[in-house]
Image (cartoon, rainbow, N blue to C red):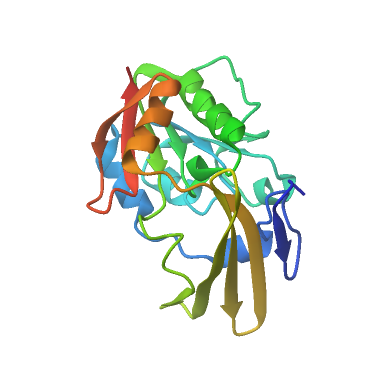
Amino acid sequence: MRQGYEGTGPGAITPDGCAVELYTRLPVGTEPDIITAAVPAAAHILELGSGVGRMTHPLLDLGFAVTAVDESADMLEHVRGARRIRSSIEDLDLGETFDVVLLASFLVHAGDVRVRRALLDTCARHVADDGCVLIQREGEDYHTDVPRERADPSGFVVRILSAEPVGDGSSSVRAEYVFPDATWTQTFLSRPLTKDAFEEALAEAGLKVDRYLTDDGIWVRAVKG
């Protein structure tokens, strides 16, 4: 396990505390529609942190080519139809570039600043000069609106139980996913980023915001510059 990360519940748990079976159950949501509206048709997407293919498979169905990267072999076993690469995002260097690099799942909020920098450097290293990077950010009240819960229409409840400061600007966040037949928890480190801090982090990697794709600012399109 990565330091500060933990997961509980049935089945395999990845180094960052994610439960593989849980992610096979989670619904897709609106993310593929947001991505489709922001990138060229039939683009080749480098998906960083693909997991079990929750977004990979809808993107393939929409006509995109996808290279799926994840550090967990257990996650990648579930990915079908995409080129699969097992690697940590921080260490990835494929020697090629892509139309689109996708960094979802709030990964840009990594608790360790060095990890965040490495994630964004990987994005910048792999995006084509005329390509774009799509990044998913946390909501502004993510660390303050706790505890909170949401009942998903598909039949489970997700709770953010706590977000406790642990020093150096990061927090230990504890989440719980309750299904009728199983419960999973995940504890992970997350660093809040204001809009200005987020844009400064992009600039360190040679990236800049092209536009915010959603009114809440959670999805962002960035380009080189």
Question: Horizontally, is 141 left or right of 118 in the view?
Answer: left
Location of residue 199 by image quarter: top left
Image quadrant assignment for residue 196: top left
Count up the numbered dots.
Answer: 0
Q: Measured along the vertical axis of the image, is residue 169 above or below residue 209?
A: below
Among all residues in the image, which is located at the extreme bottom?
180
Across and down, in percent, residue 174 comes to: 60, 65
Residues 130 and 208: in front is: 208
Asked if one can make out residue 52 in the rendered structure from this viewpoint, the answer is no
Q: Is residue 163 above or below residue 159?
A: above
Q: Please, is residue 162 above or below residue 137 in the view?
A: below
Question: Which residue occupies the foreground of this view, 117 or 100?
Answer: 117
What residue is shown at x 66% (from left), y 34% (from top)? 88
Q: Quadrant of the C terminus?
A: top left
Residue 3 position in % (x across, y down) = 74, 47
Residue shown at the point (43%, 63%) measured from the top left:
144
Q: Position of residue 39 (x, y in %)?
A: 30, 34
For residue 14, side relative to residue 32 (left or right):
right
Check the image and report above or below for 51 versus 222. below
Residue depicted at x 65% and y 68%: 185
> Residue 122 is drawn in which quadrant?
top right
Q: Is residue 221 visible?
A: yes
In this orientation, which residue lies closer to the viewer: 14 or 85? 14
The residue drawn where x is 34% and y is 49% is 218
Where is residue 58 drawn, in percent x and y?
Answer: 43, 51
Q: Nearer the viewer, residue 147 or 118?
A: 147
